[in-house]
Image: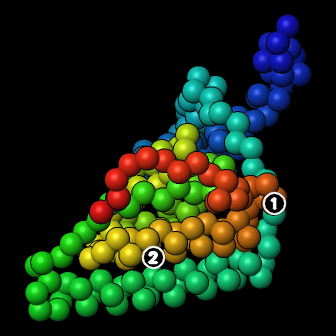
């Protein structure tokens, strides 16, 4: 008998439904525009059906919040947002702004964690002038569209900043030392430049 079919496996599965079911019930009530007893129960039932019928794969997190590293992460992120906002504003308002050269840059992250991949992708997308256009989950690779990149060196500089952002994320909320691979040991993939 598998763990999913055993009584303890079923109990564990039912217990794991509640944390997901409650927000789904709230969303149900918001969609109907009324928090009545009927809507709450109907939302809970629909939420339970959705969570049981479409179970999410387990997410193995090795999180340990480090307050000082988190403060550094948030501080550097705020500085990046402000500096990039000014840079984007200047790029769009300066004379000759119609001759922008944009780029798609591939960044291979060192961390094998999907959670870190998601956090880095979200933080990078929130920085003006860059947007994540694709994510290759199996290789932990981000593809970014960058505004006003005039050389391969500028693309490499942005790639370096994303990898530094990844290191700050791991330092602040990431797991253990094995979460970061040595970049020198990573295979070099063939292909052209990302410009």
**Residue at left 61%, top 85%?**
75
**Residue at left 75%, top 36%?**
16
Q: In the displayed structure, does residue 67 sit left or right of residue 150?
A: right
Q: Horizontal and vertical percent for residue 124?
A: 47, 68
Q: Quadrant of residue 18?
A: top right
Q: Which residue is mark 1?
A: 177
Quadrant including the C terminus: bottom left
In this rendering, does residue 45 appear at all? no
Q: Horizontal and vertical percent for residue 56?
A: 62, 34
The crowd level at tag 2 (other Cα within 10 Å; few <14, some 14-19, many 20+) is few
In this rendering, does residue 185 appear at all? yes
**Residue at left 18%, top 89%?**
93
Mark 2 element type: helix
Q: In the displayed structure, does residue 23 sit left or right of residue 86?
A: right
Q: Which mark is on residue 157? A: 2
Pick the residue in front: 64 or 55: 64
Residue at the far top in the pictured view:
1
Q: In the displayed structure, does residue 63 sit left or right of residue 185?
A: right
Q: Horizontal and vertical percent for residue 49?
A: 59, 26
Q: Is residue 71 above or below residue 29?
A: below
């Amino acid at each position: 008998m598998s763990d999913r079919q055993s009584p303890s496996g079923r109990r564990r599965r039912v217990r794991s439904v509640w944390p997901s079911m409650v927000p789904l019930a709230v969303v149900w009530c918001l969609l109907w525009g009324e928090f009545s007893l009927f809507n709450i129960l109907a939302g809970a039932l629909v939420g339970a059906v959705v969570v049981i019928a479409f179970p999410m794969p387990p997410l193995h997190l090795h999180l340990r919040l480090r307050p000082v590293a988190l403060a550094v992460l948030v501080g550097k992120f705020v500085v990046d947002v402000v500096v990039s906002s000014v840079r984007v504003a200047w790029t769009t308002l300066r004379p000759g702004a119609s001759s922008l050269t944009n780029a798609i840059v591939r960044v291979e992250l060192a961390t094998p964690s999907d959670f870190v991949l998601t956090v880095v992708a979200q933080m990078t997308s929130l920085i003006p002038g860059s947007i994540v256009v694709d994510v290759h989950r199996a290789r932990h690779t981000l593809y970014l569209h960058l505004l006003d990149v005039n050389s391969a060196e500028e693309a490499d500089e942005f790639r370096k900043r994303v990898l530094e952002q990844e290191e700050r994320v791991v330092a602040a909320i990431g797991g253990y030392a094995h979460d970061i691979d040595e970049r020198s040991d990573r295979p070099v993939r063939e292909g052209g430049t990302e410009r």
